[in-house]
Image: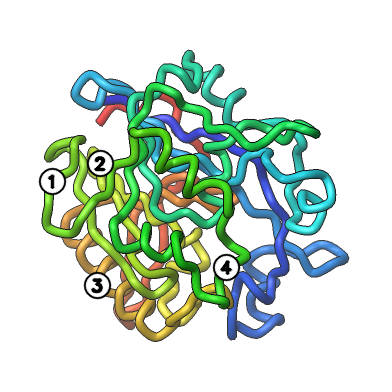
């Protein structure tokens, strides 16, 4: 297997929202905000080539499906579908992907499933030859969102996935169609049924740990539905990955794709052995 980190469309979001109850004076030391208090965020995807003979994409980022006014509101930087360009740099097109694994269906993780916004044309799915893997519990959340996170979902996406005939719901304790090469676990703190994937000794952290600053246990996002639960889940996750030497893949860290977990003599977790990108990493 070979691993590639693929850049998708980037965002600038309010730093206070991204760092929850962390004080402004603290989080601005980690990531410098702009004049509107926004911080840069990647929407990074993981491509695995030759996973038992298949090309598997973990997440699709935010994509370019927003109309211009919403693109401005949600701080999406580019107006083109950057992920498709990144796939091309890896020698593939979206038609070459055999499976797309989605940790959850919030628009900054699943929007890249859709073609770029085209005035007068309805949304349409990309990746026509891929299975779309989603956690079964989270699928129910996407079908009936809570008012707290309803705006985080794309209303048109659920019926499009259902109509595709290629939706695969993954349940805890069951093996997916990807077989034993991909290990799944689930989290509740950010959103119900968030699906965490591990492949080749690399864990896709999704929104359990968006980037290096969030490795620190007390740091959560304002978008998390259940921060205390998330912290407990994060500690268990970090203890497990540290014990087994599993590395962390970050989707939202604008400067780091892959890192290893550390823990100091006071029990504080951190990230080391930083990789800004992955280009055909053998695992």
Residue under label 3:
236
**One can see residue 276 in this view:** yes
Q: Residue at x 39, y 40 (%)?
A: 58
Dot 2: element: strand
The reply to whether discs 2 and 4 touch (Cβ–Cβ < 8 Å) is no
Decide: is 268 above or below 131.
Answer: below
Bin the neighbour count of mark 1 within 10 Å (Cα to Cα): few under 14, some 14-19, many 20 and up: some
- Per the model, the C-alpha gap separating discs 3 and 1 is 22 Å
Q: Residue at x 42, y 30 (%)?
A: 4
Residue under label 1:
175
* Left or right, 152 with reference to 205: right
- Per the model, the C-alpha gap separating discs 2 and 4 is 30 Å
Dot 1: element: loop
Residue under label 4:
150
User: Within the image, what quadrant is residue 182 found in?
Assistant: top left
Bin the neighbour count of mark 4 within 10 Å (Cα to Cα): few under 14, some 14-19, many 20 and up: some
Q: Residue at x 33, y 60 (%)?
A: 261
User: x and y percent of residue 24 in the render?
Assistant: 70, 81
């Amino acid at each position: 297997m070979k691993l590639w980190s693929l850049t998708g469309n980037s965002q600038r979001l309010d730093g206070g929202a991204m760092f929850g109850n962390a004080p402004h004076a603290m989080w601005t030391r980690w990531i410098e905000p702009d004049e509107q208090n926004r911080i840069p965020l990647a929407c990074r995807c993981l491509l695995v080539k030759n996973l038992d003979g298949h090309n598997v994409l973990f997440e699709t980022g935010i994509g370019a499906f927003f109309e211009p006014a919403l693109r401005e509101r949600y701080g999406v930087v580019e107006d083109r579908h950057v992920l498709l360009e990144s796939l091309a740099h890896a020698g593939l097109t979206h038609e070459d992907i055999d499976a797309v694994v989605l940790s959850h269906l919030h628009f900054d993780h699943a929007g890249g499933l859709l073609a770029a916004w085209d005035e007068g044309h309805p949304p349409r799915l990309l990746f026509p030859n891929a299975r779309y893997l989603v956690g079964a519990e989270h699928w129910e959340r996407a079908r009936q969102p809570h008012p707290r996170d309803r705006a985080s979902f794309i209303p048109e996406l659920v019926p499009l996935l259902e109509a595709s005939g290629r939706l695969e719901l993954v349940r805890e304790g069951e093996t997916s169609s990807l077989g034993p090469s991909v290990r799944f676990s689930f989290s509740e703190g950010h959103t119900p049924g968030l699906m965490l994937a591990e492949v080749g000794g690399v864990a896709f952290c999704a929104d359990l740990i968006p980037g290096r600053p969030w490795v620190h246990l007390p740091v959560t996002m304002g978008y998390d539905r259940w921060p205390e639960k998330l912290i407990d889940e994060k500690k268990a996750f970090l203890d497990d990955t540290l014990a087994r030497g599993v590395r962390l893949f970050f989707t939202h860290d604008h400067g780091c794709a892959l890192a290893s977990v550390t823990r100091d003599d006071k029990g504080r977790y951190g990230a080391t052995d930083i990789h800004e990108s992955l280009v055909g990493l053998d695992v």
